[in-house]
Structures are given as C-alpha cells and as structure tokens.
Amino acid sequence: MIPASFDYEAAESVDHAIELLGSGREAKLLAGGHSLLPLMRLRLARPELLVDIGRLSDLSYVREDGDAVAIGALTRYHDLENDELLRTECPVLADAVGGIGDPQVRHRGTIGGSVAHCDPASDAPTILLALDAELVARGPSGERRLPIAESFGGFLTTALDPAEVLTEIRVPKGGTGTYMKSTRRSQDWATVAVAAVRANGDVRVALTNMGPIALRAAGVEEALASGADPAAAAERAAEGTSPPSDHNGSSEYREHLARVLTRRALEEALA
C-alpha cells in the first residue's frame, strides 16, 4: 500500500528535532525506517510530519563511561555487533544484535529506533531489559534518564514524551549470557525468544513476544535465587505472561517454547 501524505523535515541537530516535534503537528521520528515505514505503508501510522534524524552522526557511538557502556541511539546493529569495546564489556549484547534480521536490516536498523518502537517481538528491548539498561532522552524540558523497564508503556507505546528524542542507551559493564530465539525462518521476527544474562552475581531472564511488551521472567529469577536448577526454574517461564496466538503459533505453543528456550538459555549462560 501507499502511505498517507505527509510532510518531511531533515533535522540538523537534536534540538532542531525537538523543535520540529513540538510544532503542533502529529510528528514521528525517522531513523533507520525499519519500524515506522512498514506501519505507514499499511496506514496503521499516519503522521503529518516525518522528522528525519538519520543524519545526526553525533548520535552514533559506543564509548566507555564509568561503569557503563554508552551507546548512541542511532548506532546501527552492524556497528554494535563489530564494536570491540562492546564485545569486551558487554558481549551478550554484541552477540545478540548479530542475529537481528539480515545484513541489510543490521546495516540500516538502529538500536534506538527499536527501543522507541517498542514492538514486543523485537529483540533489542528484551536484551536491554535483561541488562537493566538505562535510557537517556532529551526534550523541551531538558534531559532525563529512566530505566528501560519503566519506559515500556504498552504495545508499540513508550513512556517517552511525543516531543522527546531518545539520545542514548546505557548498559552496565560485565553483561554475559545468551539470547535464544525460535523463528519460522532465520530472518523472521521471533516467535518466542529468551535473554539470560549474568551480571554482578545475578541471573536475569527476559522474554520476547510473550505479552504486549518485553517481560522479565520474575518466576524464573525467583526460582534461581532460591537454588533451583535451570530445568526447574524454566518451568516457571510462562508465569505472568499473555502470549498472542497467530499464524506463528498458539499462546499454548508459545508458553511451551518459553519453557524450552529458557532452560536452554540458562544452561548455556550458567555453564
């Protein structure tokens, strides 16, 4: 389908983007375009104004900042996958983004765009949730930080203000573990996926496509903290979830997949 008509502006800076977002028109940010443009073609999104921030090179970086790795929101998956600092300080994230989509997607898609889009089938929000990442956003009132767990507002909805720009994602150093997903084809969205992360002596587990947002598997984490082995802890993977039923599988099938993938991910992460 053809998108509804819209105006287009290329932002020259983050401040210029904030100004355009606050112009009174229904505006959307355009970065890599892999999330927004398909919705526009289906006319599920009809912004009056597209604000293109894809050329803001100062939002593409990976750098060390104290006990965290700071990642610019416009950093593309390909660059994250191959960044030596990230591979050293948070290898689970570098490995996981290498399995997103195909090479074309990884060369164009941005990590900030995925987080701001908040699709429950996306990989990046789940991995960042398991890492206890922190988001940095800038708007008319200045800059603020919020834990990623507090940024998910619901299906395709975040706690970011319409006039705010996500500028940075901060992940703690030392994140190891694995991200496992089941797909019908290698380049598809995950039917179900599981992130199992070890950091600071804790094991954190997060789930993809098991509800309207990325979810922490609280039952699994509680069982592990009580001394359960991976197999026993994984039996609680579907607790508190509400997986969809669609052409990729029923909700019952997804619950089964969550338990199987959680066990496998835990066994690998704890090995």
Image (cartoon, grey):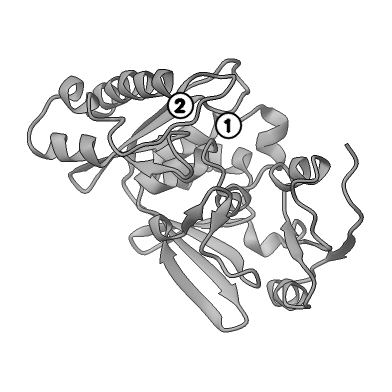
Q: Residue at x 62, y 82 (%)?
A: 140
Res 78 quadrant in image: top right
Disc 1 residue crowd, few under 14, some 14–19, many 20+, Cα 10 Å? many
Is there any visible trace of residue 249 in the rendered image?
Answer: yes
Residue 119, position as x, y percentages in the image: 56, 43
Image quarter (top left, top right, bottom left or bottom right) of the N terminus: top right
Inspect the image, locate mark 1, and give the three-letter code of the amino acid beneath it: Ile
Q: Residue at x 19, y 24 (%)?
A: 230
Residue 108, position as x, y percentages in the image: 72, 41
Mark toward the start of the polypeptide (1 vs 2)? 1
Mark-to-mark CA distance, 1 and 2: 14 Å
Q: Is residue 221 left or right of residue 207?
A: left
Image quarter (top left, top right, bottom left or bottom right) of the C terminus: top left
Q: Is residue 17 left or right of residue 66?
A: right
- Kindly check if marks 1 and 2 are in contact, taking CB atoms under 8 A apart as contact: no
Q: Which mark is residue 169?
A: none
Identify the element where label 2 is drawn: strand
Is there any visible trace of residue 53 in the rendered image?
Answer: no
Residue 270, position as x, y percentages in the image: 22, 28
